[in-house]
Amino acid sequence: MQEYPKNQLEFERQFPTEQSCRQYLMTLRWPDGFRCSKCGNQDRWDQGRNRITCTRCRHETSVLAGTLFHRSHLSLEQWFRAAWWVTNQKHGVSALGLQRTLGIGSYETAWTVLQKLRRAMVRQGRDLLSGDVEVDETFVGGSKPGKRGRGAEGKKLVVIATEIDGKKIGRIRMRHIPDASASSLEGFIKDSIAKGSGLVTDQWGGYNGVKSLGYGHKRVDGEVVGIEEVVPRVHRVASLLKRWLMGTLHGRFEPKHLDRYLEEFTFRFNRRTSNYRGLLFYRLLENSVIAEPVPYTKIINGKSA
Ligand SMILES: [Zn+2]
């Protein structure tokens, strides 16, 4: 693992130039040293502006190819500053705040940068939740209460899974789902929770099939233990999520971007005990170099890469 800055001063010392940022990304991409993707050669020529040529087969590549920063007109210094700022805000960030921080003219650029960083906060195929895991759904947004299985005007259904860590909450995962049907719930469960884990849910029929998927299953009857005690950890996370959506986005989030916000929340939550904000910054950059570059048109449509 590379060294990462632990405060503003260290950040400024570690990344004073474009070159220092580029060097850092190279070490993240090739922890064991550069290797040509065509011939495996380890010697290279650096040709400026992030270009690298293999000394043997002359294959040309960019340090930024396949990373979040590819084909961006922002400098790496600006990207690093954005990533540092995003991870150092305790609760969340806005495009306007980022625009001011970077001193860039375009709100649209700031917004795109922010969405890209949000996307990099969740690593594809990262570790699945395991052990005993609570699962339940909740509605976010809108003003009227929603009805399960059907939805309600302006409301979005979010399924939440939380690891049970004694009395505490372990890691979490969440996803926006169209309805609380078995197929929606099972798709999320399979993608998020390791087989063999013990699921804890209420009596909702959408969870009937999870045993046949290879999970343990404990159903809790809300009429016996009290509705708040069925999946208390999910309830706690749901209320934190709603408060965060209200506070950060003032409740006016665009539904098509809900998944990005859920990813940001999950990233922050799962690293809430990280001692250093710098570690968050490191993880974000680490994810950035393996995230596929996403064209702007895909981002504004809210599609996943
Ligand atoms: Zn080569």
Image (tube, grey):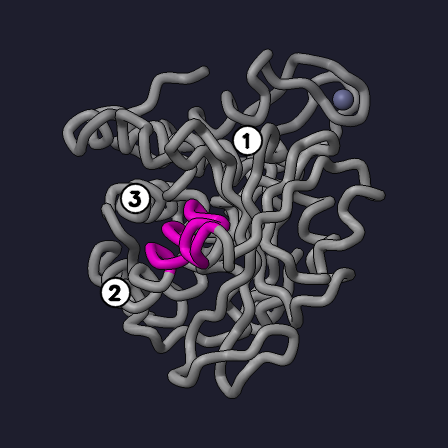
Q: Which mark is residue 286?
A: none
Mark 1 Cβ inside 8 Å of ligand 1: no
Q: Which residue lies furthest to the front in this view?
A: 224
Q: Name the residue under label 2.
A: 247
Tag 2: amino acid: Gly
Left or right, 33 with respect to 112, comes to right
Q: Which percent across, then down, holds residue 127?
A: 61, 31
- Report, in whole angstroms, how far the alpha carbon at label 2 lies from the one at label 1: 46 Å
Q: Looking at the image, do the residues carrying marks 2 and 1 touch, with CB atoms under 8 Å apart?
A: no
Question: Measured from the top left, where is residue 240 in percent x and y?
Answer: 33, 55
Which amino acid lies under the numbered mark 1 shown in the image of this protein?
A: Gln
* Residue extending farthest right: 212
Q: Main secondary structure of the magenta part?
A: helix
Above or below residue 53? Residue 290 is: below
> Label 2, label 3: how many angstroms apart (C-alpha)?
23 Å
Q: Residue at x 38, y 33 (%)?
A: 168
Foreground tag (3 vs 1): 3
Magenta segment boundaries in residue numbering: 225-241
Residue shown at the point (66%, 71%) measured from the top left: 179
Report the side of 16 relative to 110 (left or right): left
Closer to the camera, 204 or 126? 204
Q: Where does label 1 land, which residue? A: 47
Q: Percent position (x, y) of residue 221?
A: 56, 53
Residue 11 inside the magenta-drawn segment: no
